[in-house]
Image (cartoon, rainbow, N blue to C red):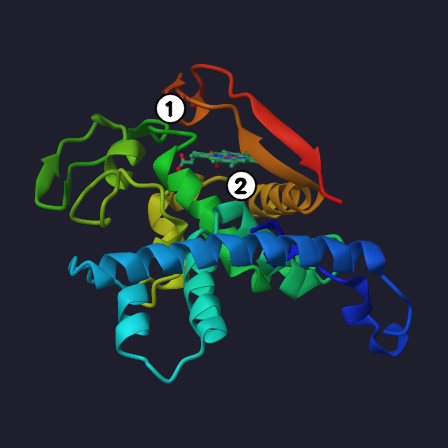
Amino acid sequence: MAGIIEVDWRDFFPYLKWIPNKAFEMSIQQKLFKMMAVMNALIKEQIKRIDSGEEVNCYLSYLLSEAKTLTKEQITMLVWETIAESADTTLDRLYDEMRKVCGCNKVKEENLSQLRYLDAVFHETLRKHSPTPLVPLRRVHENTQIGGYYIPAGSEIAVNIYGRNMYKNHWDNPEEWNPDRFMDEKYDPLDMYKTMAFGAGKSACAGSLQAIFLICVTIGRLVQEFEWRLNDGEEEKVDTVGLTSQELHPLFAILKPRE
Ligand code: HEM
């Protein structure tokens, strides 16, 4: 997988193609060799299953039995592409998106409008882990009718943001952290504000734009500079505590500077 996001700097300067880059070529050759070995074993195993009469309805079976015009190399690459695409992690996708938009430059505020996936990751995280699960209390000054409820003057109201963001009628599989929900055409980019992470109305967060710019650029820079992973079992530590959510258990991440 590492080979997928490796870049030969000469691709950005085609007129310098003549300069050797042996280290890069060797690293890609080694990865290609390992990939071919794994794919050959996979294909061999599948052919054995088909020959033994076992009914396996999958993409590889289809390619092997139906698409007879394909060469072995073509089958290998088609299956490999599918595996590579499906193994795409959030961090790889963020990194790839930034490479496409910013090239080798550091991500800046002016790039953010083009970084849709980064935006989706930011808003989905605010939805799933609402930093302010309850909007500060609102005091009702006059008798009011809203959403079918009568609210007498003098009442105090707290909006349950966490509850809204976990509401099945508003979100598909709300328990699942899935930035792709915002990439789906059925969502308007403005739907990201449905999370109400920054409150709403006259007292809505005065620093929301500053927060969005600062946090997205920071996430972008951290992904550009480091490969991230969590220690085993760390994914389970999602519990939060407090009126402004803080991690209940500290999360230990392992960082490796990108080469
Ligand atoms: C991810 C980061 C942030 C989140 C999730 C957040 C969330 C919120 C929420 C939920 C409220 C209450 C809104 C309401 O009552 O409807 C609020 C108010 C406020 N926030 Fe933020 N905030 C963030 C960052 C910031 C930053 C960076 C600043 C300042 C630079 C800021 C300044 C304020 C101010 C001044 C208010 C009070 C607004 C008022 O009562 O008129 N916030 N924020």
Q: Is mark 2 within 8 Å of ligand 1?
A: yes
Residue 192 shown left or right of residue 31 in the figure: left
Would you place residue 219 above or below residue 103 in this image? above
Query: How far is the residue under mark 1 from the one under mark 2?
Result: 33 Å
The residue lying toward the viewer, choosing from 218 and 254, is 254
The residue lying toward the viewer, choosing from 27 and 91, is 27
Residue 128 shown left or right of residue 29 in the figure: left
Q: Is residue 199 visible?
A: no
Measured from the top left, where is residue 49 in percent x and y? 24, 57
Which residue shows up at 25% across the image and 42% down it? 174
SS of the residue under disc 2: loop
Looking at the rendered image, the disc whose residue lies closer to the viewer, 1 or 2, is 1
Measured from the top left, where is residue 132 in percent x and y? 40, 29
Return the mark for residue 2. none
Measured from the top left, where is residue 3 in percent x and y? 63, 55
The three-letter code of the residue at mark 1 reads Glu
The three-letter code of the residue at mark 2 reads Ala
SS of the residue under disc 1: helix
Which residue shows up at 61% across the image and 48% down it? 213
Which residue shows up at 8% across the image and 45% down it? 148
Which residue shows up at 48% across the image and 39% down it? 205
Q: Which residue is mark 2?
A: 206
- Comes first in the chain, label 1 or label 2: 2
Residue 128 shown left or right of residue 226 in the figure: left
Q: Which residue is mark 1?
A: 236
